[in-house]
Amino acid sequence: MRIIVLDGMGGGLGSQIISRIRHLGGPTVEIIALGANAIATAAMMKAGAAIGATGENAILVNVPRADLILGPIGIAIPHSLLGEITPGMAAAVALSNARKILIPVTQTHGHFELAGVDSKPLAVSLDDLVMRVTRVMNELL
């Protein structure tokens, strides 16, 4: 199973995701860190990703090969993450056949809101992500 964790800016959310899921898989699970910038990729690699790559082309090449994509909801919204997510990156995520588990982080940049989604502490959202990843892994493995 190929799990892609995609993040930008400082890679803080992606790092937290990787540190929480890296123990879930065995030798058949590969966690790939894809950063919109080198700082995000480096942070996610430090958190325990098996391999990592940076930039739009790396995202366009690897996202279609994923079984599961994890990250903030902004990875599927053009021009989000302070403009780091290009329309091509967002389209690649949205069009990928991979299952996507995205965290609704909107409070820090405020240019969009999600109706019907209550604001929760990040730790609660990360716990929910881990539960969902576990469920998807059980279905796919």
Image (tube, helix red, strand yellow):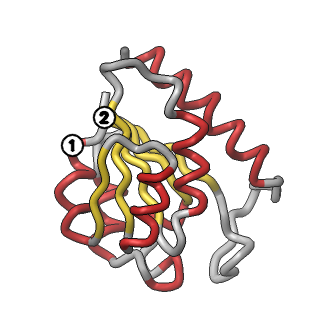
Q: In terms of depth relative to the viewer, which is nearer, 123 or 96?
A: 123
Give the residue number, with chain letter if any, for mark 1. 65
**How many numbered marks, from 0 up?**
2
Given residues 52 and 118, the one toward you in this image is 52
Mark 2 neighbour density, 10 Å: few (under 14) some (14–19) many (20 or more):
some
Rendered position, 102 above or below 137: below
Where disc 1 sits, the SS reads helix
Q: Which residue is mark 2?
A: 2
Q: Which quarter of the rendered picture does the C terminus lie within?
A: top left
Q: Are marks 2 and 1 in contact (CB under 8 Å)?
A: yes
Q: Is residue 75 above or below residue 69?
A: below
Q: Nearer the viewer, mark 2 or mark 1?
A: 2
Mark 2 lies on a secondary structure that is strand
Q: Nearer the viewer, residue 131 or 32?
A: 32
Residue at the spot 64% in from the left edge and 28% down from the top edge: 131
Q: Amino acid at mark 2?
A: Arg
Q: Which part of the image, by quadrant, shows the N terminus?
A: top left
**Can you tell which mark lies on residue 117?**
none
> Mark 1 is on which residue type?
Arg
**Residue 32 % position (x, y):** 34, 45
Q: Is residue 80 above or below residue 22?
A: below
Q: At x 55% / y 21%, what residue is drawn?
A: 135
Q: Answer with the quarter of the image where residue 95 lies.
A: bottom left
Q: Position of residue 33 (x, y in %)?
A: 37, 52
